[in-house]
Image: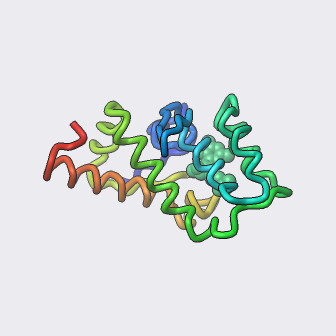
Amino acid sequence: MTIYFYKVWQPYGCFSNFSPHGIHMQGTYWPTVEHYYQAQKFVGSTDAAIIPLIHAAATPEEAAALGRCSTRQLRRDWDLVKTEIMREAVLKKFITHTDIREVLLKTGDEILVENSPTDSFWGCGANRAGLNHLGKTLMSVREEIRNLLSLTGIYE
Ligand SMILES: Nc1nc(O)c(N)c(N[C@@H]2O[C@H](COP(=O)(O)O)[C@@H](O)[C@H]2O)n1
């Protein structure tokens, strides 16, 4: 059975990057994965001044709106690095928060899909044929945590 998720208040909402599960990355605390991901778009860019504003955004929706502003200059390598940046943040989220780690592990080998009607890169898009990179990231993180727990128990 494929598991679809999208909004935080819907089933499996903890898989959304907008869920209220903070992460520490390189010594800085970020309120959500979405805050961190949106800020990384501007590291080293001429618009890096937006980073503290994204960091201070009151909600992930606000952080996303700031990061999606089309007049700002993204870092040049963004398309090359964004999937790895997302993976590191999502892995940190599920290592940090044991309650949602259990939710993720309990999905077993089910296919996970971000059911975004507007995003065919991170989600499946309106026609459900999109790339689903967030779902793939979650499945990859699930596998990594499962392997590390069985080999070493280092996340316990
Ligand atoms: N608009 C919106 N609302 C949500 O609740 C979402 N979960 C998402 N998807 C997330 O948006 C991020 C991609 O943003 P960019 O298009 O790269 O700026 C990513 O975290 C998706 O999972 N969108």
Using the rendered view, name the quadrant where residue 7 is placed: top right
**Which quarter of the image is occupied by the C terminus?**
top left
Query: Where is 28 relative to 4, above or below?
Result: above
At which x and y percent is residue 31? Answer: 56, 33
Considering depth in this image, is 33 or 104 the residue closer to the camera?
33
The residue located at (73%, 38%) in the rendering is 53
The total of numbered circles placed on residues is 0
The answer to whether residue 118 is seen in the rendering is no
The residue located at (62%, 60%) in the rendering is 125
Q: Residue furthest left?
A: 151
The residue located at (68%, 59%) in the rendering is 44
Using the rendered view, name the quadrant where residue 99 is placed: top left
- Colouring: rainbow
Question: Viewed as shown, does residue 9 lie left or right of 139?
Answer: right
Query: Where is 79 relative to 25, above or below?
Result: below
Question: Viewed as shown, does residue 41 lie left or right of 89?
Answer: right
Query: Where is 83 relative to 65, above or below?
Result: below
The answer to whether residue 101 is seen in the rendering is yes
The residue located at (41%, 53%) in the rendering is 138
At which x and y percent is residue 36? Answer: 58, 45
At which x and y percent is residue 112? Answer: 42, 53
Question: Viewed as shown, does residue 93 lie left or right of 77?
Answer: left
At which x and y percent is residue 13? Answer: 49, 37
Query: Where is 20 relative to 68, above or below?
Result: above
